[in-house]
Amino acid sequence: MVRGHGRHYLVQTDDGQRLQCVPRGKKSDCVVGDRVRWLPTSPGEGVIEGLEPRRNLLYRQDEWRSKSFAANVDQLLVLVAVEPVFSESLLSRALLAAAEAGIETRIALNKTDLPGVAAARERLAPYTTMGVQVMELALKADAAVSLGTLAPWLAGKTTLVLGPSGTGKSTLTNLLVPDAQAQVGEISVALNSGRHTTTHTQWYSLTAGPIGSGAWMDSPGFQTFGIQHIEPMRLASLMLDFAEPATRCRFANCTHRQEPSCAVRAAVEGGQIAASRYRIYLELFDELSRPPIY
Ligand SMILES: Nc1nc2c(ncn2[C@@H]2O[C@H](COP(=O)(O)OP(=O)(O)OP(=O)(O)O)[C@@H](O)[C@H]2O)c(=O)[nH]1
Ligand SMILES: [Zn+2]
């Protein structure tokens, strides 16, 4: 499934044909990236009979609702930029959701042609140190070099991009998928969604563009990223810089807040865990420990 709008879905067959489909029955829990079983109803139209089992599902869980980004994702690219200055909390939340779903993640820092690049690199240093790959891009200023950086990683894989608004997601999609704008226009007409901006996640093949193989899923920019589906006691094991020290605390059920002989707090004091990351951990632990308000 390549794009959904309400109960209307655009389905692409393995030979590249696209059909408008509606689900059989009332429930529709199909998300972009799902492989679906469908039956034709009329030329160009069909009905979704069912979903194939998913390999994974990446979503955010806010207090009130959950929002699926995509299913069957090989890897996640979190796109941030020198400007607007990115929120480390949002970045950490996206990494946590991906870790929980078992999806390999890289960070890309875009707009490295801007003067704030040194400060942005410094804010990303804890992520590099913990083993997350950070790729530097200048999608507008030097598209060819940026494509060269991305190509080996994107080729043959299905990649989802996530990032706040204004970081360059559309710029990147247009580089990777030369006719992306035309596709979005056509699809908006087909699904009668009447919007041409990135309001929904969309799947594109990378075959016709400079990468030559694989798929790309572009998602709308987000301002919040709830991870209510993650147990607070699981946070440390999902955070790459916390996972190892957390195994050395005196208490197996250490929350790394005030317990004695806590190896995580020792690592914060010793500088192996960045202060910013520990702040984010405490904030998330509190948030996830609060009972939901209904
Ligand atoms: N200086 C600089 N600006 C860039 C670069 N790449 C993109 N931009 C600019 O950043 C702005 C945002 O880019 P978009 O591609 O629209 O960003 P987006 O993430 O799709 O934003 P939303 O549509 O709001 O989600 C545009 O004005 C781009 O021209 C770059 O490498 N350097
Ligand atoms: Zn501890």
Image (tube, rainbow, N blue to C red):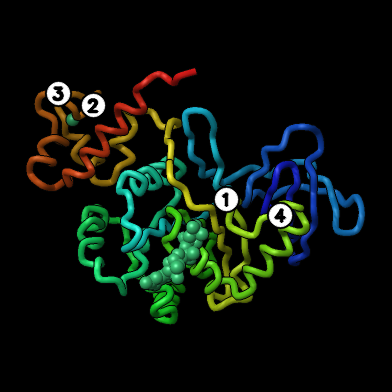
**C-beta proximity under 8 Å, tags 2 and 4:** no
Q: How many residues crowd mark 2 within 10 Å: few (<14), some (14–19), many (20+)?
A: some
x 48%, y 52%: residue = 221
Q: Report which residue position mark 2 lands on.
A: 255
Q: Which label sits on residue 278?
A: none
Q: Report which residue position mark 4 lands on.
A: 194
Between 46 and 187, the one nearer to me in the picture: 187
On the picture, is 183 further left or further right than 278? right
Residue 201 vs 48, above or below: the answer is below
**C-beta proximity under 8 Å, tags 1 and 3:** no
Q: Report which residue position mark 3 lands on.
A: 259
Which is in the foreground here, disc 2 or disc 4? 4
C-alpha span from label 2 to label 3: 7 Å
On the picture, is 131 further left or further right than 146? left
Amino acid carrying mark 1 in the image: Asn
Amino acid carrying mark 2 in the image: Thr
Which is in the foreground here, disc 4 or disc 1? 4
Q: Quadrant of ligand 1?
A: bottom left
Q: How many residues crowd mark 4 within 10 Å: few (<14), some (14–19), many (20+)?
A: few
Amino acid carrying mark 3 in the image: Glu
